[in-house]
Amino acid sequence: MSEKSFKGHIGIGAKVSGVALVAKDNFSARYDLDRVKGIFSRQAHKLCGQSYVDKILVLDNAKGGVATAWMLHEMKSRKMAPAALLLNAANPIMAQGAALADLAFMDRFDVDITDAIKTGDRVTVDPQAGTITVESA
């Protein structure tokens, strides 16, 4: 098993570890998810049908508007949220939503994070240090 580390922008939330779910696709908590079933539900999304609950979500860019903040918070309150959210690029609304939900969140990595991590990898996210560590599956 190999281990590698990456730097990103200082993030939000506590240190967390989990299994990665990765796609080179964008992310909206409002339009991409069935928040009751805990799966990606938008048919065109590359993760359609897969559970995001307790996963380290690794996606390309944030999309969507103000509904993201309360949706992430609502998902976390029902224990139906991802363990962390890692994006190549986020917007202020996504960061606000992660903060409101107390969800580990990072973006702006030194690599394309959707290429560096594979689904099934074990990932440790340390937002306060601005680092992630990946153990390849």
Image (cartoon, grey):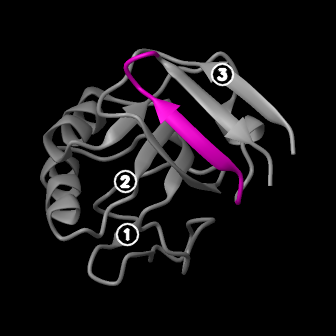
Q: Secondary structure at mark 2?
A: loop
Assess whether residue 121 is covered by the magenta stretch: yes
Q: Quadrant of the N terminus?
A: top right
Badge 2: residue crowd in 10 Å (few <14, some 14–19, many ≥20): some
Q: Position of residue 29 (x, y in %)?
A: 32, 57
Helix, strand or loop at disc 1?
strand
Q: What is the CA distance from the residue labelled 2 to the residue labelled 1?
A: 8 Å
Tag 2–tag 1 contact (CB < 8 Å): yes
Say which quadrant the C terminus sits in. bottom right
Residue 135: numbered disc: none
Residue pointed to by mark 3:
6
Q: CA distance from mark 2 to mark 3?
A: 24 Å
Q: Give the residue displayed 28% in from the left and 32% down from the top.
A: 95
Q: Which mark is residue 33?
A: 1
Q: Which residue is mark 2?
A: 28
Q: Position of residue 26 (x, y in %)?
A: 51, 48
- In space, the residues marked 3 and 1 are separated at their CA atoms by 27 Å
Numbered range of the magenta stretch = 120-129
Task: Pick the residue in front: 76 or 90.
Answer: 76
Q: Earlier in the sequence, mark 3 or mark 1?
A: 3
Q: In front: 94, or 116?
A: 116
What x and y, as percent, mark residue 6? 66, 22
Q: Is residue 105 above or below residue 41?
A: above
Q: Earlier in the sequence, mark 2 or mark 3?
A: 3
Residue lying at the far front of the rendered structure: 1
Residue 27, compared with residue 43, is above or below; it is above
Three-letter amino acid code at the position of disc 2: Ser
- Residue 106 found in image quarter: top left
Q: Amino acid at mark 3?
A: Phe
